[in-house]
Image (cartoon, rainbow, N blue to C red):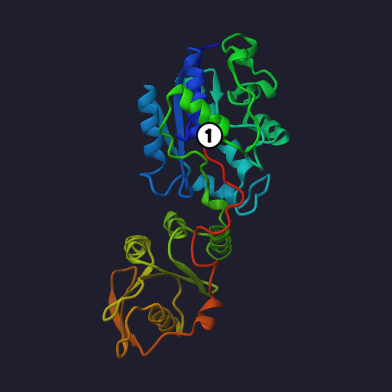
Amino acid sequence: MHRKALALFSGGLDSTLAVKIMLDQGIEIEAVNFTSLFCNCNPRKEGCVHQASRAAREFGIPIRVLAKGMEYMKMVERPRHGYGRGMNPCIDCRIYMLRKVRDLLPEAKASFVVTGEVLGQRPMSQHRRAIEIIERESGLGGLILRPLSARLLPPTIPENEGVVNRSKLLDLTGRSRKVQITLADAMGITDYPCPAGGCLLTDRVVAARLRDLFRHHPDYTMTDLQLLRYGRHFRLDTGLKAVAGRDEEENRRIRALADGGNTLFQPLNFRGPAVAARGILGSGMEDRIGRIMARYSQDSPNGFTIERRNPDGGRTTFSVDGGLASEAIERWRVGCAGPGGNRSERGETAG
């Protein structure tokens, strides 16, 4: 068995410790980082890929970055093992990533996989039964080494074959990260900007928006998925959804994403939200969108003038005399004001 492993690596505290423990045993490591539109490890930092790449450089190990694209989203639509409290298919997600890593083993000349999982830390995917399911369905039975909890789990093949010294592995369990933080300090690991990373699929607002997208737009695109992160969402008709920005940064993002085939509405004589509309603009819908924009305006002009830019680039203008009442708007609302609601169950990351 080769003394090389592929490591699921988010750059967070747990996966960083797992890699450090392996490196200290002389195991060659190549990191694998999975990116997702729904990663929420730390919105104040540069992003999950940056964090993982920076940590890999500090360890002097190579890293591969793999995107969870449409294939992944089709799994999210119909996960075999169901969801957590939101739209988070944590067991199926883990199986998905591990199968991808399994397929890389021969090319990388690696013999097993390392993860930063801690027994009992994630309520959906890191209890014993879930771990057994993941091992079996990933096709990596006996080849997934979890250094932080290894001594609480059956010995893996690399342990049995003496490639890894089991006595130097740990027996951590539970959701607290106090022990990990103490270990990191002792090992000189001080920069782990994603100590308890999460996934927006666990967010009740994003989950509601995603269910709505699956239900009404089965031909959804990556642009549709990106828009789930921003603005106020309104289901105006069975085949029409509108996304209105809440601040200038969201307006900027919505304007950019509208190029993906949406109709873009922008205020001309007032300060208000940009709106991306996805679907068929039937009778009265243009006026409805304009009145939503007026409702969230920061100004009170004598008539609100709005530019409409169609997907083919054609532009027209129209006006409305005022905004709709909040009670009227709320009946079209998908979810609430925006991401950041209930995250009582943290989502899964790559370690």
Q: Residue furthest top?
A: 162
| Residue drawn at (40%, 77%) of the image | 296
| Residue drawn at (54%, 82%) of the image | 327
| Residue drawn at (45%, 58%) of the image | 229
Above or below for 301 versus 16:
below
Residue 116, visible in the rendered structure = no
Image quadrant holding the N terminus, namely: top right
Quarter-of-image position of residue 108: top left
Q: Amino acid at mark 1?
A: Gly
Above or below for 104 versus 290:
above
Q: Position of residue 130 (x, y in %)?
A: 69, 36
Residue 176, visible in the rendered structure = yes
Above or below for 41 versus 149:
below
Q: Position of residue 23 (x, y in %)?
A: 47, 17
| Residue drawn at (56%, 78%) of the image | 331
Q: Position of residue 145 (x, y in %)?
A: 59, 23
Q: Secondary structure at mark 1?
A: loop
Quickly name the residue at label 1.
351
Give the crowd class for mark 1: few <14, some 14-19, many >=20 residues within 10 Å: many
